[in-house]
Image (cartoon, rainbow, N blue to C red):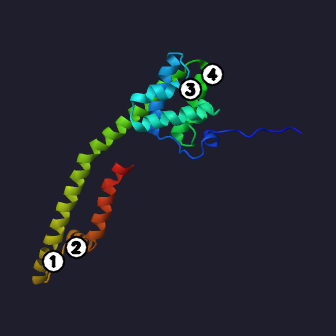
Amino acid sequence: MSSQQPSTSARDFLPESKPLSLAQQLAVSQQIAQLVRAKRPIVNELPRMAANSSSEIRQAAKIVDERIAAGATLDSALAGDESRNSRSLSACITAGELGQGMDRLLESWSSLHLANQRSTLALRNAMLYPTLLIVVTLVSVGSVVWRIIPEYQSTYAQFDQQLPSWLQLIAVVREHVAWLLLGMLLCSFLPLWV
């Protein structure tokens, strides 16, 4: 009978700590890349290197250092959860360990995610003006429809005439304008949440 050893992950070593956020992974990856390039050990050096960083980054470096000191691999210590970002970081670490280019791979991974964050922020900022323009247009058209259509209806009713079909359509829309405006308003903010 062969006994199989259960695989260990970072959670096995420090179960009370939660997975690192993407920002923490980015900062710690950059610091590890510098340590690898300088051919310095990661254990004990990582917290020292993060000493001048924010408290969140210092805490993340300490967690990764403790995980590695407890026997976890760099892969499971830094990218211990199952998110897409952690899986890609894990693949970079594995490729770096096999190919002697860990520093370049970690820096490339960090650069990719930082560029992605910048472009996402720029896209959201760029969508602000069109969204405001749509909202202002919807409010102004809605207020005109709300006030003018009853006047047209009463004018046509005084002469016992039927509204033209396009005005009848607008009158039907007016009856449901509150729901339509709410739906359009929600749809106009959808690009900001995606």
Quadrant the N terminus occupies: top right
The crowd level at tag 3 (other Cα within 10 Å; few <14, some 14-19, many 20+) is some
Q: Is residue 85 left or right of residue 135?
A: right
The crowd level at tag 4 (other Cα within 10 Å; few <14, some 14-19, many 20+) is few
Seen from the viewer's position, the closer of residues 62 and 150 is: 62
Front position among marks 4 and 3: 3
Residue depicted at 56% across the width and 26% down the height? 43
Residue depicted at 26% across the width and 69% down the height? 177
- On screen, 90 above or below 82? above
Task: Specify which label sits upstream in the sequence, 2 or 3.
Answer: 3
Q: Is mark 4 in CB contact (under 8 Å) with mark 2?
A: no
Q: How far across and down, in percent of the image, does residue 187 sit?
A: 33, 57
Residue depicted at 47% across the width and 41% down the height? 21
Q: Which residue is mark 4?
A: 98
Q: Is mark 1 in CB contact (under 8 Å) with mark 2?
A: yes
Tag 3 secondary structure = loop
Tag 4 secondary structure = helix
- On screen, 90 above or below 124? above
Q: Which amino acid, by three-letter code, is at mark 4?
A: Leu
Residue 13 lies in quadrant = top right
Residue 73 lies in quadrant = top right
Q: Which residue is mark 3?
A: 43
Task: Specify which label sits upstream in the sequence, 1 or 2.
Answer: 1
Q: Which residue is mark 2?
A: 171
Q: How far across and down, in percent of the image, does residue 169 sit?
A: 25, 70
The crowd level at tag 2 (other Cα within 10 Å; few <14, some 14-19, many 20+) is many
Q: Which residue is mark 1?
A: 153
Visible in this render: residue 81?
yes
